[in-house]
Image: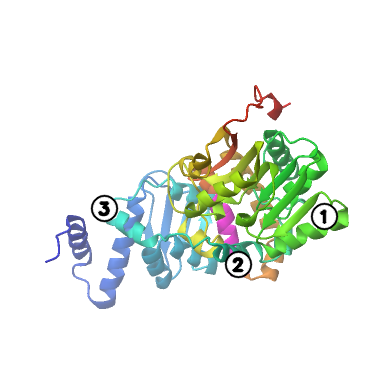
């Protein structure tokens, strides 16, 4: 005999009362509205309106509405109720759901929704999925899905150095171009790079940081990356601009890094590693770092363990997982690395995304011509949702500096970071 579940039994009783007297399609319609109302009310406090294709509306319980979410069809509503974030993201991408008003303000409120309870907690767990595998083969496939969709696409809205990670707004009025240069300088100062230092970089993007370390700090840099498009772009620039004797871009997995280095750096790559492979990354760093070597890992993270937004993991960033600081210690503790400095640049990433979104919107026509309108809507939701996640505190941006525990050649203060 099945064990009674008071939560489910109460939910069934409430649903029966809400649909009493309806028959056939009318009963189904009444049940949909009941479920939608229950979901929306569970997300209180909120200041947005939800409107169905036939004019049925759920208004804010108090205050004025900052946005109206229009659900234009029954299939869109059904998928939203069944699939949660994936259903919303897919329907927004196809135009079956639109948001009139403040999209980012609406998304911030969604991210600030209290933790689900009762039946909604069960449903949320069922909707979540573990990130896809980050084995060497899985990582290549995951990275190809996101980064190899075309350099011309990213050129439309990134800065001239193609920096696709959080900028550093050392001064509030900085434009994105200057803030990305400041980010790279900030990282180099944290690593205390000196002329002739050998640097291993795991995940090089389009090669901007390696280029910066070599040209402005005199470092000799070897960068590993599994995105063929990015490595080709970075290598071509190094050859044409004449510094390929100081920077080498290797089309290979970070787990295959070889050699001995004075510094190790990884910017925006840990999100793609996966918790199961943090010890592997720690092994790589331990294998390649000198006795007095320094390391820095720059990553999107969270304040407590939680999976990536299910739609983003499925459609945009397969295999992605933003770690907590505690989870990151699985990289450092097995090899007794000493953490020297932790900085959280959360609001810097919100400003970065604001700049990217502005440039993306300005390139709407070109993006749509390269792909289609559904792609453009999906990526706009991804960028807007990411900005909302950083503003709401759902996501963080950690920079962690570390070294070996017996390294006594340490800076006495943080003056070198700002002088």
The extreme bottom residue here reads: 24
Q: Secondary structure at mark 1?
A: helix
Give the label on residue 118, or none.
3
- Tags 3 and 2 in contact by the CB under 8 Å rule? no
Q: Residues within 10 Å of mark 1 (few under 14, many from 20)?
A: some
When asked about the image quadrant of residue 215, the answer is top right
Q: Is residue 120 left or right of residue 391?
A: left
Select label 2 or label 1 by which is in front. 1
The extreme left residue here reads: 1
User: Magenta: predominant secondary structure element?
Assistant: helix
Q: Earlier in the sequence, mark 3 or mark 2?
A: 3
Q: Is residue 338 above or below residue 355?
A: above
- Tags 2 and 1 in contact by the CB under 8 Å rule? no
**Residue beneath disc 1:** 238
Give the label on residue 385, or none.
none
**Residue beneath disc 2:** 375
Residue range in magenta is: 373-387
The extreme top residue here reads: 412
When asked about the image quadrant of residue 149, the answer is bottom right
Q: Residues within 10 Å of mark 3 (few under 14, many from 20)?
A: few
Residue found 79% across the figure and 44% down from its top: 214
C-alpha distance separating marks 2 and 1 = 32 Å
Residue found 69% across the figure and 45% down from its top: 260
C-alpha distance separating marks 3 and 2 = 36 Å
Q: Secondary structure at mark 3?
A: helix
Q: Quadrant of the N terminus?
A: bottom left
């Amino acid at each position: 005999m099945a064990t009674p579940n008071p939560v489910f039994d109460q939910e069934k009783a409430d649903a029966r009362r809400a649909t009493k007297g309806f028959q056939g399609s009318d009963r189904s319609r009444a049940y949909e509205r009941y479920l939608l109302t229950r979901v929306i009310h569970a997300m209180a406090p909120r200041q947005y309106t939800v409107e169905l294709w036939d004019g049925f509306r759920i208004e804010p319980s108090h205050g004025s509405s900052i946005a109206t979410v229009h659900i234009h069809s029954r299939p869109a509503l059904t998928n939203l109720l069944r699939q949660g974030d994936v259903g919303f993201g897919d329907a927004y991408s196809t135009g079956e759901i639109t948001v009139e008003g403040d999209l980012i303000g609406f998304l911030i409120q969604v991210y600030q929704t209290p933790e689900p309870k009762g039946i909604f907690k069960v449903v949320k767990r069922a909707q979540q999925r573990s990130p896809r595998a980050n084995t060497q083969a899985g990582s290549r496939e995951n990275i190809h899905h996101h980064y190899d969709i075309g350099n011309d696409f990213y050129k439309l809205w990134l800065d001239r150095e193609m920096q696709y990670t959080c900028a550093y707004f050392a001064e509030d009025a900085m434009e994105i171009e200057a803030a990305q240069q400041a980010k790279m300088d900030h990282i180099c100062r944290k690593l205390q790079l000196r002329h002739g230092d050998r640097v291993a970089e795991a995940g090089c993007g389009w090669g901007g940081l390696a280029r910066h370390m070599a040209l402005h700090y005199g470092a000799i840099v070897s960068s590993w990356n599994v995105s063929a498009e990015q490595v080709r772009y970075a290598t071509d620039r190094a050859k044409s601009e004449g510094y390929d004797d100081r920077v080498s871009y290797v089309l290979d997995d970070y787990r295959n890094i070889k050699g001995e280095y004075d510094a190790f750096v990884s910017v925006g790559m840990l999100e793609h590693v996966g918790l199961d492979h943090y010890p592997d990354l720690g092994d790589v760093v331990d294998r390649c770092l000198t006795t007095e070597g320094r390391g820095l890992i720059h990553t999107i993270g969270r304040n407590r363990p939680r999976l990536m937004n299910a739609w983003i993991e499925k459609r945009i960033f397969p295999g992605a997982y933003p770690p907590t600081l505690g989870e990151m210690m699985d990289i450092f503790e097995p090899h007794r690395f000493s953490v020297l400095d932790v900085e959280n640049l959360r609001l810097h990433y919100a400003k970065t995304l604001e700049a990217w979104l502005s440039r993306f919107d300005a390139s709407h026509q070109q993006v749509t011509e390269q792909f289609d309108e559904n792609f453009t809507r999906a990526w706009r939701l991804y960028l807007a949702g990411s900005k909302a996640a950083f503003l709401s505190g759902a996501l963080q941006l950690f920079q962690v500096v570390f070294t070996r525990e017996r390294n006594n050649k340490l800076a006495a203060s943080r003056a070198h970071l700002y002088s």
